[in-house]
């Protein structure tokens, strides 16, 4: 069989529109998670670098917001279906519990990756001796 290649299939406007829609959907889902992950990572860095209950509270507050966002994506958008066709109330509860567990797993993986990145970053900065005192700016050395 002589079927056209992927490049030939993308020449049509309908195929390009479909591909563009899929890429747009992916970016609309990925960037808010990335943005919240950066916020949680920065709050984690502050909690590790500086002692204080406030920094830990900010970290857990942002982590809670990240969890709420992930829960909204996994539970309010179309769920991952584990049963086909019409499902009973019991199966619906099992499916919702499964989707909630997927959400919790995604949250734990994101926090684990963020903690590994932040711990590595703080270790690297500590090895370089770049620890700064909060509220103290470091000016450039004077030129003689």
Image: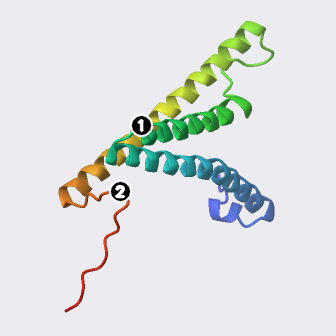
Alpha-carbon span between mark 1 and mark 2: 15 Å
- Above-or-below relation of 71 to 133: above
Which residue: 41% across, 44% down? 44
Which residue, given by chain and number where applicable, does mark 2 sit on? 134
* In this picture, residue 106 sits left or right of residue 17: left
| Rendered-image quadrant of the C terminus | bottom left
Q: Is residue 86 visible?
A: yes
Characterize the local packing of mark 2: few (<14), some (14-19) or many (20 or more) Cα atoms within 10 angstroms.
Answer: few
Q: Earlier in the sequence, mark 1 or mark 2?
A: 1
When the figure is inspected, residue 21 is found, relative to residue 115, above or below; the finding is: below
Q: Position of residue 13 (x, y in %)?
A: 79, 65
Q: Which residue is mark 1?
A: 53
Label 1 crowd (10 A; few <14 / some 14-19 / many >=20): few
Q: Tell me residue 97's x, y (percent).
A: 63, 17
Q: Which of 78 and 135 lies nearest the eye of the viewer?
A: 135
Total numbered badges shown on the rendered structure: 2
Q: Secondary structure at mark 2?
A: loop
Residue 113 lies in quadrant: top left
- Side (left or right) of 143 relative to 114: left
């Amino acid at each position: 069989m002589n079927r056209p290649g992927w490049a030939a299939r993308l020449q049509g406007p309908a195929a390009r529109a479909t591909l563009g829609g899929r890429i747009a959907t992916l970016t609309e889902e990925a960037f808010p998670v990335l943005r919240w992950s950066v916020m949680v990572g920065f709050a984690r860095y502050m909690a590790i670098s500086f002692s204080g209950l406030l920094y830990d509270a900010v970290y857990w507050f942002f982590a809670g917001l990240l969890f709420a966002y992930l829960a909204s994506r996994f539970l309010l958008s179309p769920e991952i279906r584990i049963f086909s066709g019409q499902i009973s109330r019991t199966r619906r509860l099992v499916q919702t519990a499964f989707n909630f567990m997927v959400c919790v797993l995604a949250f734990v993986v994101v926090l684990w990756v963020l903690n590994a990145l932040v711990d590595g970053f703080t270790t690297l900065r500590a090895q370089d001796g770049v620890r700064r005192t909060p509220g103290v700016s470091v000016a450039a050395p004077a030129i003689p």
